[in-house]
Amino acid sequence: MSGDSAPVPSGQSAFGDRYDVKTSAPLPEFTTCGGDAFMAVDKERPGKDIYALVQHPTIPVRNEVYKSLKSRPVANVVNPIDRGLMNLDLKGQKQRLVTIFERPTGGALFGPDGKVHPRVNTNKLRQSIVLSALKAIAAVHKRGFTHRSIMPTNLFFAAPDGDEVCIGECYSAPPGYKHPFALEPLKLALADETARGEGDIESDFYQLGACLQSLYFGEALWRGKDRDSLLMARVNQSSFWALSGGREIPGALGNLIRGLMADDEDERWGAEDILDWFEGVGKPKRTSMKAWSMNRPTSFKGVAYVDRRLLADAFARDPREAANFLKGIDFPAWVQLSFRDEILTERLEATLNVVPGGGLGGTRPDDYKMVSRVCMFLHPTGPVHFKGHSFFLDGLPSALADAFSRDDRDLIGVILDLFDERFLNALAEVCAERNDRFMTQVRGLRPIMIHGSSKSLGRGMERVLYAMNPILPCVSQRFSNVWIGSIKQMMRALDRMAAVGPLKNVLLDRHIAAFCTAHGSDLERDFNKIAAAQNDPVRLNSLSAEFFGMLQRRFKLEPLHNLTEKLVDGLSNTVKALKNKKRRERVTALLEKVKKGGDVHKLTTELNMSRIQVEDSREFAQARNALMKLDREKAKLGRKILPTDLDARTKGLRGSRLVAFVVMLLVGFMAFFPA
C-alpha cells in the first residue's frame, strides 16, 4: 500500500468481532443518504433481527439523536443498538463507522422498487399506520428533537403478521438531507437540499401527511415533477392539491391528510388535532394565502408574481437580474404599492439599502447582499438566499460538509462570503419581527466564522467544517481508507502509515491541521510555528517531533514505534548538521535508544533538538570567531615588517621617545654631577 494513505488496522475491533456484517447482502430498503445497509448477525444473540448501516464519512450524523435513542429506545421507531469501527471489504479493505439497528421484518410500506406493500389499505392507513406514526413522532418530540426523515420509503411493518408500523432511523444523515422537494414542508423545501436545517415539530407532521397521501394513491407522488412548476402549484393551490394532481381523498382520511399538509404552520394539524380526529371531533383547516399575498403583482423576467415567497425564490435563482431589477425601480414606492400592510421605516429602508442605478460596472459584490436583504424582507421566515444558493443557518454545517465532499470550491466560497457579521446582523434586523430565532443562530456562528477567511494552518474553512461538525471524521485524502474521529485515532493511523511509507509534510495538510485544532486545545500556536518552518526541512522535522510528542503525552497513548522511528530518521540530517563531534555522537546514541522505546515524548524531552541546535550553533559561532581572531594574529606575526607600516611607525616613534628620554636623563645626570 502507498505510504500516502493510512492503512486499516491489522486486527478487527471488539465491536467487529461481535457483529458479522454481510457486505454481499445489501438491504436497499434501509439504505439512506448517510450510509449503506447490509444484513448483519449478532454473534452473542444470533436470533435477534438486526441490520448494519455503514456510514459515509463525508456526511455528519446526528450524534445527540443516537445517544438518546440508544439509551432509551422509542416505540415504533427503528432504534440504534450499538455502533463502532469495523474493517470491511468495500471494494478494498476500509475502516468504517458501523451502526447496528433493530430490523423490522414486515417490509417497507413503499418499497425501493416503487411498489406499495400489498397489506397497505385505507383501513390500515386510518387506524394502525396513523396511530403508530403518531406515537413515534410524539415520543421523539418529547425527547427534544425532530425526526425529519418521515417518508413513504422509511415506514415499515414491524412484523410480517402484525399491523404495527415503525418509522425508520433518523440518525445517519442531517435533518431533511437531500429529501425530495415534495416531501419537505414548503418553507424548508425552498432551501438547498443539503441546507434545510433542523426544522420544527410541524415539519414532521407535514411529512406524515405527505406519506399518507402517497400511500393512499399508491404512487410516488414526489417523483417526476419539475421543481419550479411544483413550487408554483404548491403556493397557488396548496401542497395537498399540487401533489395529488387535483385528486380528492374523500372522507375523514382526506380531512386528516389536508390538515397535516397545511402549508401555514399555524394551521397545520399536530398531535392533539390527530387525537381529536380519532375521536371524530376534528375540524378541517384551510391554508390562508393572505399572509404572503402582495397587493399588486410584480413582473420579473416576464412572470407576474403575487406571492412574496415566489418572488423571493425567483430573485434567489437569478440574483444578477434581480439586482438590476431592484436598482431600476423606486424601491420605497414599490414597497408602498405592493405591501400596503408593511411600514417601511427609515431604519428598515437604510438596512435594506437598495441603491438605485448601477452605472456601467455590472453586478457589484454588494449587489448580492442587497438582493439577499430584499429576499429576507419578502420571506422573513424563509432561508437566506445568497449568490444563487439558499441556506437555513442551522443547515450550513451539512451544506459545507457536502461542498467539501465534492470539492465544490465555489460553494465553499459562497459560504465564506456569507460569514460577514454586519451582513448577517442586517438580515437579522430585517426579519426580527417574524423570525426571532435568526439572531440566536447568528450569535452561535460568531465564534466559528472568524476562522473562515484566515489562511493560517489550522484555520480557514477547513477549521469551520470541523467546528460546525464535531462528529465528522477527518476527511483528508491521507485517511480515505480509515475513520478518524479523534486525535488518538489520528495518531494511531499515522503510526500505521509510518510503517509503510514516509510522513512527508503530514502536518502541513490543511485538513489534518484543522481537525487537530478543532479537537485539541491551544494547538494554533504550534501550527503557526510549523507553517513558518515549511521551507526549512531541518526545523520542520524538529517541530513535528515536538508536536507529536506533546500529543502522545497529552492523550496518554501507547508506544508508537513506527512513528518514532520515522521521526528519528527525519532528524538524521539535523544530527549530521551538528558541528560538535562529541555532541553528535551522544545525540545519535540517545536517538537509537528512543527509537527502540517508541516514546515520541522522550524524543522531545530528553533530546530537545531545538535547544541542542541553538547551543551547537552558538558554540560553533564562538569557536569560529576565536579561530578567526587567531588567524588574524598569526597573519600579522608572519608577514614582513616595512618602515611604512602604520604599526611599525607608531611603535618606532614610541621607542625613539623612550631612548630620547633615557639620553636626556643621562646627560642631565652627568651635567649636574660631574664627579
Image (spheres, rainbow, N blue to C red):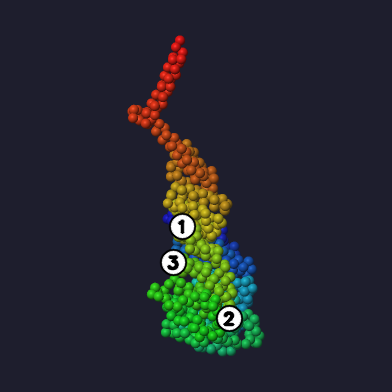
N-terminal of the two: label 2 or label 3?
Answer: 2
Name the element at disc 3: helix
N-terminal of the two: label 1 or label 2?
Answer: 2
N-terminal of the two: label 1 or label 3?
Answer: 3
* Label annotation for residue 265: 2
> Residue beneath label 1, please?
509
In the rendered structure, are the residues bearing label 1 and label 2 in contact, judged by CB atoms less than 8 Å apart? Answer: no
Name the element at disc 2: loop
> Residue beneath label 3, please?
409
Residue 626 sits above or below residue 286 on the image: above
Amino acid type at circle 3 is: Arg
Amino acid type at circle 2 is: Glu
Residue 108 versus residue 183: which sits nearer the camera?
183
Q: Point out residue 478 in the picture as x, y percentages from the top left corner.
A: 46, 58
Q: Residues within 10 Å of mark 1 (few under 14, many from 20)?
A: some
Residue at 42%, 32% in the rendered image = 630
Most extreme residue toward the top is 675
Residue 126 versus residue 232: which sits nearer the camera?
232
Judge from the rendering whether residue 390 lies leftward or rightward of residue 163; answer left or right. Answer: left
Amino acid type at circle 1 is: Asp
Residue 653 versus residue 380: which sits nearer the camera?
653
